[in-house]
Image: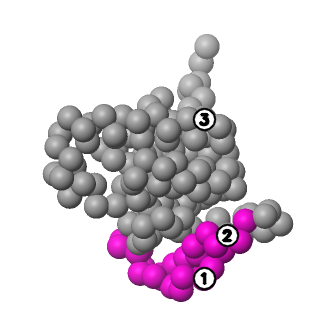
Amino acid sequence: MTGSAPAPASSRVLASVLFTDLVDSTSRASAMGDRAWTELLERHHRAVRDAVERQGGRTVKMLGDGVLATFAGPAQAVRCAERIIDSSRMQGLELRSGVHTGEVEVSSDDVAGLAVHLAARIMALAGAGEVLVSRTVRDLVVGSELRFADRGQHRIKGIDEPWQLYALA
């Protein structure tokens, strides 16, 4: 009755963040034409949502020809990225992906925070067909069947220190 209202609970949670992007999608869309490209992209999006769901993740949003998804654990995110890359190849598409685990701010329809930015920047450094992950992810999946190849230290835009990155082997 008197006093102050309790502070709202934090909307920050630990999550593994997956970003994907189709490689050379603009030139592919130009060559195919709008209708054919849109149909292919819709099939790709269905396959992506299915892969995210099968790995227990949440599709946060589709970003043109990419996806932002979150998972409770990093192995789920990495395995999902691998599944999406395989599915994309079967559709004649090349995809790159990035995964980072960290705290994110969660709202009803989005996620935000530095961990999201890092996952996006890591994805941007990935090559076609590559699942690129932060050292955080690599360290957290120790003991899993996942194996990684060292891709060295990279400067990530907006971050002062270099980050060690690894590719799924």
Give the class, few, some or many, for how many residues have Cα within 10 Å of label 3's Cα (few <14, many ≥20): some
- Dividing the image into 4 quarters, which one contains the C terminus? bottom right
Which three-letter amino acid code belongs to the residue tagged 3?
Answer: Glu
Residue 51 belongs to the span the image colors magenta: no
The image's mark for residue 53 is: 3
Where residue 126 sits in the image (x, y, percent)?
44, 70
Q: Residue at x 56, y 25 (%)?
A: 5
Q: Which mark is residue 163?
A: none
Give the secondary structure at mark 1: strand
CB atoms at circles 2 and 3 under 8 Å apart?
Answer: no
Q: Which residue is mark 2?
A: 138
- In this rendering, the answer to whether 167 lies above or below 89 is below
Q: Looking at the image, is mark 2 or mark 3 nearer the viewer?
A: 3
Can you say which quadrant of the picture contains the N terminus? top right
Range drawn in magenta: 146-169
For the residue labelled by badge 3, is the local secondary structure a helix, a strand or a loop? helix
Residue at the limit of the structure toward the top, as seen here: 1
